[in-house]
Image: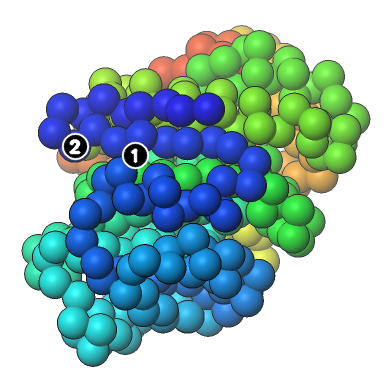
């Protein structure tokens, strides 16, 4: 299956096919005419899939950098290591960077590609469910600061995205939960029928035969949103449903407890619950979200008092002009941006 993100001169194709990784070289040759490639991956993914990718790139001069897995790698301190490896490999502006990994590698290698020599071509090959449905598409690349996630970043579109659902077979259950949080988000903000599809299954294992189509639906939603709002000033903000609280929960626990998707799940439910009490969301939406979260083993609360999170909320990059652009639901599948302040969260108690 092929989708195209139509952004004029920055347009690019997304291919979603089982076992596409083994043929990656033939797709890359369509968008890259140079010879030298730097593959950035991590120590979980590269031992599993590095050789498959390298075998498909036999006609190129390939170099590899394998970083430790996990969110701490996405810190600013990783950038000199990547730049150093690119310099050692003599990567030039006519060469290519491939991000082979989950969201951390995609964001980090993407930011390095965007900033090294003011921009080197980038291909995203996402290997986690979260990265396949969300972070590999749309051109957002970033690193974390101690004060928060993604506070240093850029908009830098890849030349190509290759999505191979079969690589998810080796993904630990924890990371399946991670991705399902974002998939549920897409149903909530844009696609009630996707939400009902998710609700009609009993578990991830039960959903798996439809997974390729579910991934494609999420990617297509994001593709359309990005085409309308490449630089995240309007409609694209809807993709942040659940993220304002989610990011602060992740940060509070130093990215060591809830994964991103789990934190977003908590954020979606708790925000929906608060919006219902204010008459901003149709009654019953939070309960429907809770039902789906339970099917896929996702949390809906973390037990923290809201006061512990509000300081971090004010640092969130979605806090524009001292206003939080909260994403709320009119109903499942129908979302909107609601500008408010941190006071929106007052009275929520524990989340």
* Front position in the image: 143 or 157: 157
Rendered view: 294 above or below 31: above
Q: Who's the residue at 25% across and 84% down the image?
A: 89
Residue 138 found in image quarter: top left
Label 1 SS: loop
* Front position in the image: 50 or 296: 50
Residue to which mark 1 is pinned = 138
Q: Who's the residue at 52% across and 74% down the image?
A: 42
Rendered view: 119 above or below 271: below
Residue to which mark 2 is pinned = 10
**Is residue 287 left or right of 115 when viewed as pictured?**
right
Label 2 SS: helix
Crowding at dot 1, Cα within 10 Å, few <14 / some 14-19 / many 20+, comes out as many
Q: Position of residue 329 (x, y in %)?
A: 52, 18
Q: Position of residue 310 (x, y in %)?
A: 45, 52
User: Which mark identifies residue 257?
Assistant: none
């Amino acid at each position: 299956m092929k989708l195209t993100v139509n952004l004029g001169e920055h347009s690019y194709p997304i291919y979603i096919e089982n076992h596409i990784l083994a043929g990656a070289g033939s797709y890359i040759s369509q968008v890259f005419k140079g010879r030298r490639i730097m593959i950035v991956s991590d120590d979980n993914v590269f031992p599993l899939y590095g050789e498959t990718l390298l075998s498909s790139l036999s006609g190129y001069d390939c170099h590899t950098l394998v970083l430790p897995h996990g969110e701490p790698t996405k810190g600013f301190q990783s950038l000199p290591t990547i730049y150093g490896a690119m310099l050692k490999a003599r990567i030039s502006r006519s060469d290519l960077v491939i991000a082979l990994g989950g969201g951390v590698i995609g964001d980090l290698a993407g930011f390095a590609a965007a900033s090294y020599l003011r921009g080197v071509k980038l291909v995203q090959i996402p290997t986690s469910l979260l990265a396949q449905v969300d972070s590999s598409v749309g051109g957002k690349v970033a690193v974390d600061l101690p004060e928060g996630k993604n506070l240093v970043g850029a908009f830098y579109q890849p030349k190509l995205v290759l999505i191979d659902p079969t690589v998810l077979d080796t993904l630990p259950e924890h990371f399946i939960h991670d991705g399902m949080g974002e998939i549920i988000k897409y149903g909530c903000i844009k696609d009630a029928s996707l939400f009902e599809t998710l609700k009609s299954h009993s578990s991830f294992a039960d959903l798996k035969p439809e997974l390729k189509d579910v991934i494609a639906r999420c990617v297509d939603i994001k593709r359309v949103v990005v085409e309308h709002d490449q630089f995240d000033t309007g409609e694209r903000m809807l993709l942040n449903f659940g993220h304002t609280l989610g990011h602060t929960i992740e940060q509070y626990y130093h990215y060591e407890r809830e994964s991103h998707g789990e934190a977003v799940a908590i954020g979606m439910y708790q925000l929906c619950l608060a919006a219902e009490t204010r008459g901003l969301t149709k009654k019953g939406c939070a309960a429907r979200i809770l039902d789906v979260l339970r099917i896929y083993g996702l949390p809906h609360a973390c037990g923290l008092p809201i006061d512990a999170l509000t300081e971090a909320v004010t640092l969130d990059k979605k806090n524009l002009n001292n206003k939080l652009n909260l994403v709320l639901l009119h109903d499942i599948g129908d979302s909107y941006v609601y500008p408010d302040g941190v006071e929106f969260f007052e009275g929520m108690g524990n989340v």
